[in-house]
Image (spheres, grey):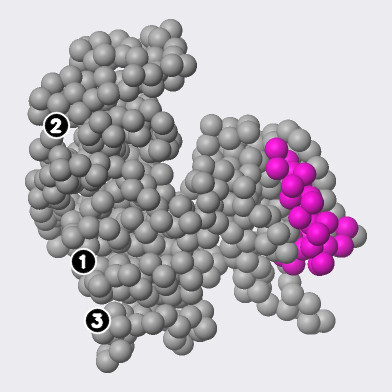
Amino acid sequence: MYFGVPRHTVKGVAVYQRIHSQGLGSFVKGAHCVILGYGVSGKPLVPYLSDHGAGKITVRDRRSYEEMQASGEAHVLQQYDVELICGENYLEGLTGDMIFRSPGFRPDLPEILEAVAGDAILTSEMELFLSETPATVIGITGSDGKTTTTTLISKFLATEAALTGRGNVYLGGNIGTPLLPMLDSMTAEDFAVVELSSFQLMTATNAVHRAVITNVTPNHLDWHRDMEEYIAAKARITYGNRLQKAVLNARDVNTQKIGATLSCPIAWFSVYDDADPSIKSGDSRLYLKDGKICITDGDTEKELLPVDKIRLPGKHNIENYMTALGAVHDLISQAAIEQVAAEFTGVAHRLEFIREVKGVAYYNSSIDSSPSRSCAALAAMREMRERLGHDETGTLRGRDPLVICGGRDKHVPFDPLADALCRLASRVILTGEARGQIMEALLRCPLYDPHKLPVTEIPDYREAMYYACQIAEPGDTVLLSPACTGFDAFKNFAERGDVFRKIVEALEE
């Protein structure tokens, strides 16, 4: 489904063609630009549009004028002579030449569709940046592993830039940093490494030069209408005539389907031997061989990195390295690969080791906001145990983790999570709005035995965290891996992880 520039009229076709030939920026001068939502993506638009000759700028925001005045935002907008429409009816009478939606706005809201039917251009801060940057854009999306992969790609490129003294690397997008304010400083020698969510991609038409999709599993189905729409949004990262290369998961049926539609070279990756994508001439494949990440084009094979050099636990992190190397191995030296592997210890809230207190190890994986992410975290923790080996009785050393999970669900089934908890956890503390749904999934699971897997339900998230710390014994591992969003109790996953970290850091030795 297409939600952006109208293409049902002669004017719409001409606009679409002009965007592809001249860029979105060619429409800004003299235009009435409307910004929906004055948040992370909306704020950089105001100075950019003002500096680039917009005829009129309007900000529409659900918050009341009093709230925006108290925060100081209304005063900032007044300095730019911005019209501000606030409150519950902020979308009434929506008109304009260019409408910039924040990612949280569905593009098929009735007010937006009516404006687009009137030949308004529906776009976003991210699409404007992607359209106008002279840098080579490497875009990363997927259900799991986006941020680690995005960070790795930027570190590989930045390390190479430091070694050669050529070009700059800009990291941003859904990872938290708007890139639009840096646009005028970028050159064709630079790289923009951009994490892109399905929300950002829903109206994208000509996004990136190199597209990376880590995987596509059920996620955000509390926002997307269905899985079909979610997959279609992810696939938009490959749209447009700029695409030079795609990096896709060889074991994921959805990325295989996306790959079948592409004519550009594809780098397929998987840590599993049973991955068997249909590889056409010009494609390549990344895989494990003798403990090394290797790549082949079908004729020649090259070793890229021994996996024992990777400082992050779990097969999923080996796959994150594969994904990143698939995107940039031809742009960087072996020295850059080895330096990043030696120095990179991970991203906050992603199986982040906090500390060990009285023989208990604490890990923060608050980023695990879907069942599939929590399953991967649990598998990584088991792999850490397996590295310890077996004792004289043949029993695996160490203990499976005590897991804190729960929060607000995304309308994604918890049955795979229940299976993983039964196999890979020693105890579970359920909390948040979805605790009952996870408990129901456990009760359905054939592997569930309440004597082997004690489960405690504590509604309040902070109380659950404190309780986990209280009952943990020497030799235990406590893992925060929610499998849900944190919006029932926190602003975002980062705040949830920070709260857990502070609780752990306050524990007495």
Residue pointed to by mark 2: 28
Circle 1: residue type = Gln
- Please tell me whether mark 2 or mark 1 is closer to you in this view: 2
User: Alpha carbon of mark 3 to alpha carbon of mark 1: how far?
Assistant: 12 Å
SS under mark 2: loop
In the rendered image, which residue does mark 1 sit on? 244
Taking the image as shown, residue 108 lies to the left or right of residue 495, namely: left
Element at badge 3? loop
Residue at the spot 80% in from the left edge and 42% down from the top edge: 457
Q: Earlier in the sequence, mark 3 or mark 2?
A: 2
The percent position of residue 258, horizontal first and vertical second, equals 38, 67
Q: Which residues are magenta?
A: 422-450
Give the residue furthest to the front: 9
Q: Label 3 sits on what residue type?
A: Gly
Which residue carries the number 3 mark?
Answer: 282
Helix, strand or loop under label 1: loop
